[in-house]
Amino acid sequence: MTQSALPHIPVAALAFIRDRRMLMVTARGRDVIYLPGGKIDAGESAREAVIREVREEVGAELIPETLHEYFDLALQAHGEPEGRLVEMRVFRGELATEPTPSSEVSALHWASTADAPRCPPAGAAVLARLFADGLID
């Protein structure tokens, strides 16, 4: 008898870049850094989810006309059983307001590829992609 596959975790995240660094956050009680973003709720589009999550995590509004899909990835989900994947839709866009930590977030970080060891697999993959595309150091 084979075990059924674990359900994937659909998420939307923002790759916001300033001065060749990407905005990342530390969630309260966690030790790794993440892209601002989170799970896509039932009935919600990935675009709606990233707008909501950025507002919730860093208190910033995205400028709608600058928001676009960048790429998708599927990798092992951090802290989940082997085989459970995070399916991440990564967006690029500009913020209308300055990001600040929310009640969900203990700190903001401006990350480069040197910070990849502090990231879950998906975050490290986004840093690598941004570096390959010449957007971050």
Image: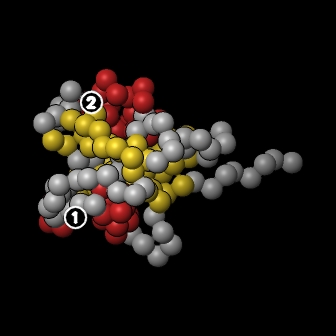
* Residue 37, picture quadrant: bottom left
Q: Residue flagged by tag 2: what amino acid is it?
A: Ser
63 over 42 or under it: above or below = above
What residue is drawn where x is 55% and y is 43%?
77
In this image, 62 relative to 12: left or right? left
What percent of the width, then of the height, locates residue 50?
34, 61
Q: Badges 2 and 1: C-beta atoms under 8 Å apart?
A: no
Looking at the image, which residue sits at the far bottom?
43
- Disc 1 is placed on an element classified as loop
Q: Nearer the viewer, residue 54 or 108?
A: 108
- Around disc 1, counting alpha carbons within 10 Å, would you say few (fewer than 14), some (14 to 19), or many (20 or more)? some
137 over 34 or under it: above or below = above
Q: Which residue is mark 2?
A: 112
What percent of the width, then of the height, locates residue 47?
32, 65
Q: Nearer the viewer, residue 41 or 56?
A: 56
What residue is drawn where x is 48% and y is 51%?
87
Q: Residue flagged by tag 1: what amino acid is it?
A: Glu
What residue is drawn where x is 51% and y is 72%?
42
Q: Which residue is mark 1?
A: 61
What residue is drawn where x is 34% and y is 67%?
52
In this image, 84 relative to 35: left or right? right
